[in-house]
Structure formats: C-alpha cells, structure tokens
Amino acid sequence: MTRPRLYSGMQPSADSLQIGNYIGALLQWRDLQEEYQAFFSVVDLHALTQPNDPAELREKTRRTAAQYIAAGIEPSKSTLYVQSHVRAHAELAWVLSTITGFGEANRMTQFKDKSARYGADQTNVGLFTYPVLMAADILLYQTDIVPVGDDQKQHVELTRDLAERFNSRYGQTFRMPMPVIQQDTARIYDLQNPTAKMSKSAESDAGVLWMLDDPAVSAKKIMRAVTDSEGVVRYDKENKPGVSNLLVIYAALTGRQIPSIEDEYAGRGYGDFKKGLAEVVVNEFGPVRARALELLDDPAELDRVLAANADRAAEVADATLADVYAKVGLLRRG
Ligand code: ATP
Ligand code: LTN
C-alpha cells in the first residue's frame, strides 16, 4: 500500500531557524514522516520576493536544509530538497497563474499585510503571485495533507480552488490537498513581546531563540524573558502571556503536561523556573546545533544529498507537469 503524501516547506529567510519553527513545524514533520510519504522543501524561489544578497541567500538555503536534517527529517525517508532545483515549480506556477483570478489573488490577506508593510516601492509582482507558486508546490506532488500555520490556511484554500477548477476544466489531474493547521498550543511567542509570534524576521532578536544560538546566549535570553509581577508559575494566556509562553515551550520540549510543570515550580520564583527552562532548551538544542554545524562543515556532501533528493522530487513533479502541459494544449516538443 502506498502511503498518503505530505508536503510542506519553509523560506530560507534567516541564518538560523527559531524555536517556533522547531516546535510548530519541524517536530510535527519529524513524526509525520513515519506515516506519510513526505516532501519537505526549502522554498528559495519564494524567498526571492524579499530583497536578498545572493551569497547570503545561498548560505541561508543550505543552513535551512541542514537544520531540517539536524532536527530529524531524514533525507533517506523523506524527500528533502531545494525548490529551485526542481524546475517544474516555476513552470506549473505559470500555468496556474493563468487560471487564477486577479481579484482572487488580491483577496489574500498575507499579500495585503506584506504590501502595506513594505510600501508600494518594495511590493513586487512575485509577492502577489506567491500563493500561486505555493499552489504549484503542493499540487505537483499529488499531495494529501499540508501541515502549515494558521497564516497559510488561506493559501491552501486557494490551492484547493485552483485544483478543483483545473480538474473540472481539463479532467482529473490534481489530488485535492487538505490543510492540517498547527494547534494553538504549538504557537510560540516572542520572549520580549509575548503577544507577538516569534519569527525569523523579527525586528529585534532579543526575544527570539535561534536554533543555532550558542547555548549561553539562549540561556541569557530566557533569563531575561518578559514575565509579570505575580511571581506564580501558572498558565493564563490572557493575563500572563510571558509565563504562559515559557510554559508552552517547556511542555513542548519535554513532552510533559503544563499542570505537572506548574506543580513542580509551585512556591518557587520565576528565576528557578527560567533556569529550569534554560536547561531544557540547552539540552534539546545542543545536539541539534552540533549536528547542523557538522553538516555545514561539509557543504559538498550536503549538496550531494540535496541533489539526490531533488532528483527524486523531480521524478514526481515532472510527471504531473507533463500531464498538465498535455491537458492545456501545449504542443509537445518533437
Ligand atoms: P518569517 O519571519 O520569514 O515569515 P517565520 O519564522 O515566521 O518566518 P515561516 O517561515 O513563516 O516562519 O514558517 C515556517 C513554519 O514554522 C510554519 O509551519 C509556521 O507555522 C511555523 N512557525 C513559524 N513561527 C512559529 C511560531 N512562533 N510558533 C509556532 N510555529 C511557528
Ligand atoms: N508560504 C509558506 C512556505 C511554503 C509552503 C509551501 C508551505 C511555500 N510553499 C507549500 C506548505 C506547502 C510559509 O511562509 N510558511
């Protein structure tokens, strides 16, 4: 029996991933790769929608891939590759863009947010068609499930609309993907601003725990995390967002329930609690960081792994693309 397919990806938008990416995405991906035939990409074509230094983009792409592997995505089990290594992505995106309504694309809230934030000068057409490229990523692999954060749900819905439209116009071509939205309990907030999501592209990195940070730096950031004046280690997202966020991180990394952690720290201050959490974080990320740095020490070998995985991805993607080209009436090269 063939296993159902899974597709997900992240942009190489920083030198290091942050622990929100790890808890909210990589930990799930690692577990899901056992049950699904999984494809995980580093979406470098998507990253081009933002200004990048070329050498830095290359480096961030390698580093992102190394961190996927270090976190437990196995390139022999899953297909872990760089999006631009498989040409079919850009090609299918073009075809899909011709069945996407302008108004439909214009309703994407992420585009509205980003274009408002960057201003008209910095808003490129690629940012506008970003969701169409994402639809191509998903549809090329005949994907069954797409694990993503809440902010990407609208893009997966657009993907479904495009799949349905194409299938009804040209006959069954794409499998209908289902979004699997990350649970609220897996959402991590900025340590200095605990009502804002922790993010790779945060303006200040004081509240961001990087996977590749030196352990001493992570510990310091945790000790300085914003809390409150109550002094009780208790989960209360509304009134105690800082402490609640630290509890969520603690629970996610240890697999423990929040009440058991609250009990352990009952009657003790935030200092003790933060020290405990710093230990948990350092223990978890120490080996992950070491493995990522080891992989990055041998870029030629890492590139070979990525190339072999891109070949496997291309086999699936090219078959879908050939079907699409034939269905829409592109003349086959003789
Ligand atoms: P950027 O700032 O470049 O948008 P990001 O760090 O916000 O980056 P994405 O690249 O948008 O992250 O997301 C990659 C994956 O990590 C997604 O599945 C997303 O849901 C997850 N993720 C990102 N930030 C968090 C967070 N703070 N908590 C939980 N999951 C997160
Ligand atoms: N847009 C997503 C990254 C992404 C993706 C995908 C996720 C690009 N293509 C396909 C799932 C499936 C993001 O910014 N997190």
Image (cartoon, rainbow, N blue to C red):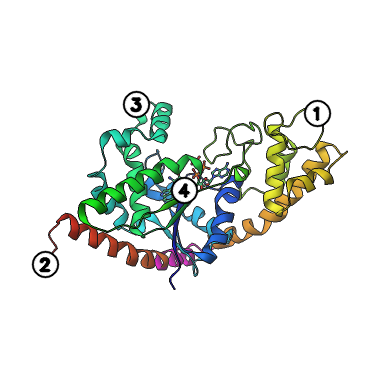
Q: Which residue is mark 2?
A: 334
Task: Determine whether the residue tagged by mark 3 lies in a helix, strand or loop.
Answer: helix
Q: Quadrant of residue 229?
A: top right
Q: In terms of sequence position, does the residue under pointer 3 or pointer 2 come before the other?
A: 3
Q: Is mark 2 within 8 Å of ligand 2?
A: no
Residue 215 seen: no
Q: Are marks 3 and 2 in contact (CB under 8 Å)?
A: no
Q: Give the label on residue 230, or none.
A: 1
Q: Which residue is mark 4?
A: 12
Please check the rendered image and state whether residue 305 is part of the magenta-colored stretch, yes or no: yes
The residue type indicated by label 2 comes to Gly
> Which label sits in the foreground, 3 or 2?
2
Q: Quadrant of residue 141?
A: bottom left
Q: Quadrant of the N terminus?
A: bottom left
The residue type indicated by label 3 comes to Ala
Front residue of 310 and 241: 241
The Cα–Cα distance between marks 1 and 4, rounded to whole angstroms, is 39 Å
Q: Which residue is mark 3?
A: 120
Q: In terms of sequence position, does the residue under pointer 1 or pointer 2 come before the other?
A: 1
Front residue of 24 and 223: 24
In the figure, 282 relative to 227: above or below?
Answer: below
The Cα–Cα distance between marks 4 and 3, rounded to whole angstroms, is 24 Å
Which residues are drawn in magenta? Answer: 298-308
Q: Is residue 67 left or right of residue 284?
A: left
Local packing at callout 1 (Cα closer than 10 Å; few below 14, some 14-19, many 20+) is few
Residue ranking furthest to the front: 168
Q: In terms of sequence position, does the residue under pointer 4 or pointer 2 come before the other?
A: 4
Residue 255 position in % (x across, y down): 70, 54
Residue 198 position in % (x across, y down): 58, 39
Q: Is residue 314 left or right of residue 205?
A: left
Residue 12 seen: yes
